[in-house]
Image (spheres, grey):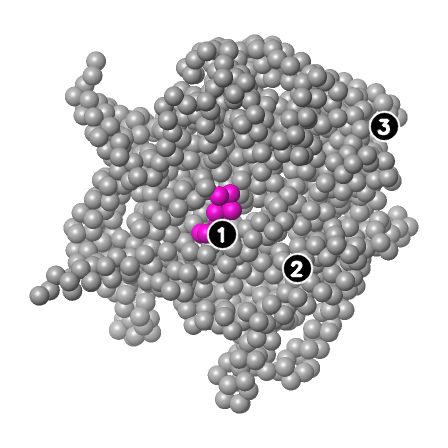
Amino acid sequence: MARFKSSAWGLAVAIALVALVLPLMLPSYALATECLIFAMAALGCNLLLGRLGLLSFGQAIFFGAGAYCVGILSLRFGTGIVAGLLAATAVSALLAVAIGWLATQRTGVYLIMLTLALSQMFFFLCYAAPDVTGGDNGLMNIPRPNLAFGGHELLSLASPFAFYVFVATICTVAFYLMARLIASPFGATLEAIRDNEDRAVAIGYDTRLYKVIAFVAAGAVTGLAGGLYALALKFVPLANVDLAMSERIIVMTILGGTNALFGSMLGSIAVVVLSYVLSDIWARWQIILGALLVAVALYLRGGLASLLDKAVARANEGARP
Amino acid sequence: MITRRTFLGTTLTAAIASPAVVTRGLAAEQVRLCTALSLSGPFASAGQPAEAGTRLAVSALAKDYGLDVSLTMIDDEGNPGRAIPKLIVALQQGVRFFSGAVLSNVGLPMSAEVSNGGGVYVSSVGADEITGSACRRSTFRWPVPSYGAMRQTIVPLIDKHPETKRWYTITPKYVFGEAMLREAQNIFKERNIEHVGNSYHSMTETEFSGYLTNAAAAQADVLAILNFGPQSTNTLRQAADFGLKQKMKILLAWSAGTEQYAEIGSDVLEDVYVGAQYDAAIDSPGNRRVVELFRKNLNVTPSYAMVNGYVTAMLLMEGIKAAGSTDPAQVIKALEGRKYEGPTGDEELRAFDHQCIKNYYLLRGKAPTKKKDKDDYVDIISFGKSFPDAQHSDCKMT
Amino acid sequence: MSVNLLLTQIVNGLGIGMIYFMIAIGLSIIFGIMHFINIAHGAFYLVGAYLCYALVSATGNFWLALALAPLAVGVVAWLAEPGVRRLYDLPASLQILATLGLALVIQEAVILIFDPLGKNVAAPAGLRGAAFFGSFVYPKYRLFVIVFTAAVAAVLWFLLERTRYGAVLRAGTESMQTVELLGIDISRIFSLTFAVGAALTALSGVLAAPIRGVEPFMGVEALSIAFVIVVIGGIGSFTGALAGGLLIGVVQSVMTTFWAAGANIMIYVAMALIILVRPHGLLGRA
């Protein structure tokens, strides 16, 4: 794990490998696509929680905003896929400036409660604006445009396979960029703020600015994930912005572990695949999910990524003479 | 013409997709049905009986149809955001025959997705769009839409009680609620009824006493409750608490059947008018068979939710049998215009919008002392068929 | 809007607000003392309501349920607290993960034991139907709830403001270390606080059951409202929870006449504003 952490290329290779293997393990591209999209959503939350210790209950704002953005642009204006996704990323990043600026006025529990309040506010706003968001019915029949550049069609994304490759590429790049970000001096400063904010202030860092920038990066990648989700489902349900969505993203992030970015991929796969497999077996499957969450909180505090860490450490030990 | 890119794509797809570890493995010669229902989440109370009905249809009828049927359940968790990903997975696995959905906001995108995926969907949801503005060649629907629910409850109630001139409505701010309200207003206009007020509420509301006070203040003769599910239960319960039953007649236009009556309780339900898609007491040969089947196999008196699950799955098998093929296009053709003996009497899947033409019922709550058994909550007052004709339908099928 | 209507809405708001208060005060004292984010708090409300349903169906006696259900939940919480204690030192994120999991387990267990269908709980015999005061009509049971919760609030106020336990509790909300230095057995305080908080929340579930019925997802709704009230009133503040509960109850109730969706937006705007402007709540100790 340590190697992946130190090298953004290593992480990108690992994500690409997962993206290659995932369809072999799962019954459909749709499920694999969902895993990758939520891995990106959890990646944003991971940056905030893992690097800064900020727990945001507002991630659904960014995810939902990205999804609505792509949905509205392609439905009403016939915007292309690249422009739509860029707009989703930008709009979510802008929202994150505001949310981050507000949320970072406070710390600890108050920050959690503040993001919770903002998230609920956003939900009820979306609910109360059916002309824009489709209200409770959501936005339906969203087209998935083909990948085009300057009027030339490059790739049809109609098939599940093509769309999966498209999402996998974006996901790999997103993880790579995020790894670069946290490996940079900026990332080191975030950790310094997390470990001792007073000291970081004393050294002369404007810690609020750093936190807001982290929110923007997290919001951007989460919004991008939301935009892809709209294209994957061809549908934007109101549920994208509800509290359960924020919880889902948080659960994936913590379950996967926040010591490494790769944990977000593991957390997303675990939640998506578990809920798919278990719900088919037993209608009360959420008991199993709930018990698993309790067990991880108590006995596997580093999340699933720490399991992988231990396995790598053991393998290294075994390899030694 | 196969371009090199698509060729590469398909071979890669085949190579990558074949050794799936997590599958819901099914043999090729089977007919694969898939039902999406809320088995967990806040709407599991409607999903669970529908599941029982769907499973009974498959286990009891498949042999009669001479089909080897496997049934996959999708738990939509009461959330379209969870339902559609699972549906897409099923479609990609080759399932083509779908039924179900408790919630309209699941059923509508499901109809679109099944259509895109080349399947057939027999829907059990209430939303008008599904055989109206969003109708599709591949989608059929059993329940009566809001038009019939309003026509077959408000009109007979006015006929029965011509003295009720002032009506108050409580409506959820939701496409379905607004459709019911629109039709109610049309009837009020036709029949010279004064619509003394309407209260909109959100889908998350649990407290309705404010609206009920408004209704009392407006001195209405009839309170028409146009919401549905748990919200309508709460509205009715609170209406009884506030003494509205003594002051006016109450109509619950879109009830969910026995499970809901049990939740409301006979004390509250007594003398309340209730609109329903189905009741076990319906006197028809088709229903007698259905009731007996449920009693024999599951030892229950069937509720609307159970029968809805049952009929929608049955219609899929009926279509496959009639088509003699599992080609979705053939099955659609076989179902179009099909007449059959259903639980509500003669039923027909009319061709132009794929809506089932069946009865809707006006019932009235029984006094607790007059119940014959524990599931006996209501008397049938009247019933009939009302549907918008082709000119007035929003359905423009291409 | 008529005077009668406004009056009904306000009385309604007070009744709902008092139930909100009881849900929130449980969360507030538990959080104040243990600094532990309990997403499973709504489960106390849920279990209280279902115990009420089970007892009323079995015995037909609501009063028995009113006495026994909170007691049972309190005792279980008392016994369970030493087990829950290992969560206190975890980071907030893991507390949330664990209690979210616990909430899911309890909710699904309720569905397993009963079923997913909502249930009707009859009000006690003498309190069914409505009371008439001239043209003003109000359900008798709801009037009872207002009076009863007011009495509970008075007892609670006495307990928290006038007894040694209350003094320790208030001191503990500010600094648990001080309390420990005074030689007080804090593990007993923890257990007692958890039990009292749980019992109060279960009591609110019992009281709510005849008004709204019981269904497996009622805990979720109680939880979010409790968080809002605790934040608005101030963590660990008795008067804050009372004022917050009544305020939210009345605002929600009166707003239904004007703009129902707006009520929810307003409530969360208020919550956000208070955290930004007065993080210790309207009546919390700074």
Q: Residue at coordinates 66% horizontally, 24% vertically from top-left?
A: B290
Q: Element under label 2?
A: helix
Q: Residue at coordinates 40% horizontally, 50% vertically from top-left?
A: A249
Q: Residues within 10 Å of mark 2 (few under 14, many from 20)?
A: many
Is C134 placed above or below B299 here? below
Q: Quadrant of residue B225?
A: top right
Q: Which residue is mark 1?
A: A287
Q: Element under label 1?
A: helix
Q: Quadrant of residue B299?
A: top right
- Whether tag 2 and tag 3 are in contact, CB under 8 A, the answer is no
Coordinates of residue B155 in the picture (x, y in percent): 77, 21
Is C257 placed above or below B91 here? below
Q: Element under label 3?
A: loop
Label at residue B164: 3
For badge 3, the amino acid type reads: Thr
Q: Chain of mark 3?
A: B
**Is B197 a magenta residue?**
no
For badge 2, the amino acid type reads: Gly
The residue lying toward the viewer, choosing from A198 and C151, is: C151
The CA span between labels 2 and 3 is: 42 Å
Coordinates of residue B251 in the picture (x, y in percent): 77, 32
Q: Which residue is mark 2?
A: C48
The CA span between labels 2 and 1 is: 20 Å
Residue C6 seen in this snapshot: yes
Q: Residue furthest right?
A: C134
Q: Is residue B288 left or right of residue A214?
A: right
